[in-house]
Image (cartoon, grey):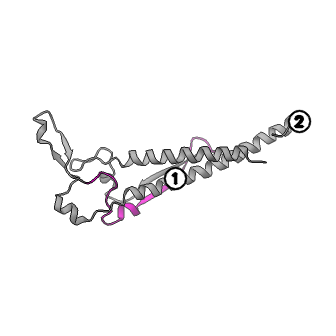
Amino acid sequence: MPKFTDPRALSGHIRRRGEVIRRAVFAETEDTANEALRTAQRLTSGPYRQEQFNRMGHPFARRFNPASKGIGRRFFHAGVFPLLPINAQSGQLRRSFRKLRRPGRDKSEVVFIITNTAPHARFILSPTGTRYQVPRPFWKELTRLTRQYGQRHTIAAFRRASSARL
């Protein structure tokens, strides 16, 4: 750690250190957004073929649960397939993910948004499902995986930038 006898030199050092840390964290934030995009594509790359779904009578359709005995509308997941990853039938859903960069609350902040432009994405990726389809935990799982990745890598970038020589 350098010793400072002049307050201006110390102030300049702190300002430069802050800029190095800000750049490192921004680069890591963009890397986390890219990882979120890759994860979204991975979560929509299911290995099953359409014939398997057809034989089962659409396993992700909402079906009435006969065991609910008039307690209300209880639905269940009828299939043996896992809810994630979402199957890639035509690949349009997987190809339609986009990363958007938006300004944050102040000029030094930036926000990345992952969205999907496929017309059927709002039905398939709906966190509550639809009238005809069970909900899939896509956004919850994407958030969980991205948060883990981002925290791990951003902390590492902060530590590297904080200990770097200026």
Residue 61: image location, x then y, percent: 20, 52
- Residue behind mark 1: 33
Q: Mostly what secondary structure, the magenta segment?
A: loop
Amino acid carrying label 1: it is Ala
SS for callout 1? helix
Residue positioned 77% across, 39% down in the render: 14
Looking at marks 1 and 2 on the same chain, the residue that comes earlier in the sequence is marked by 2
* The N terminus: image quadrant: top right
Residue positioned 22% across, 63% down in the render: 52
How dense is the environment of label 2, judged by Cα within 10 Å: few (below 14), some, or many (20 and up)?
A: few
- Is residue 89 rendered to the left or right of residue 57? right
Question: Which residue in the rendered view is the most extreme toward the top?
Answer: 71
Front residue of this view, candidates 98 and 20: 20
SS for callout 2? loop
Front residue of this view, candidates 40 and 46: 46
Residue positioned 21% across, 50% down in the render: 132
- Is residue 32 rendered to the left or right of residue 158? left
The region drawn magenta spans: 81-108
Front residue of this view, candidates 11 and 162: 162
Residue 42, which numbered label? none
- Residue behind mark 2: 6
Residue 96: image location, x then y, percent: 40, 61
How dense is the environment of label 1, judged by Cα within 10 Å: few (below 14), some, or many (20 and up)?
A: many
How far is disc 1 from disc 2 in space, using C-alphas?
41 Å
Does the magenta portion include 98? Answer: yes
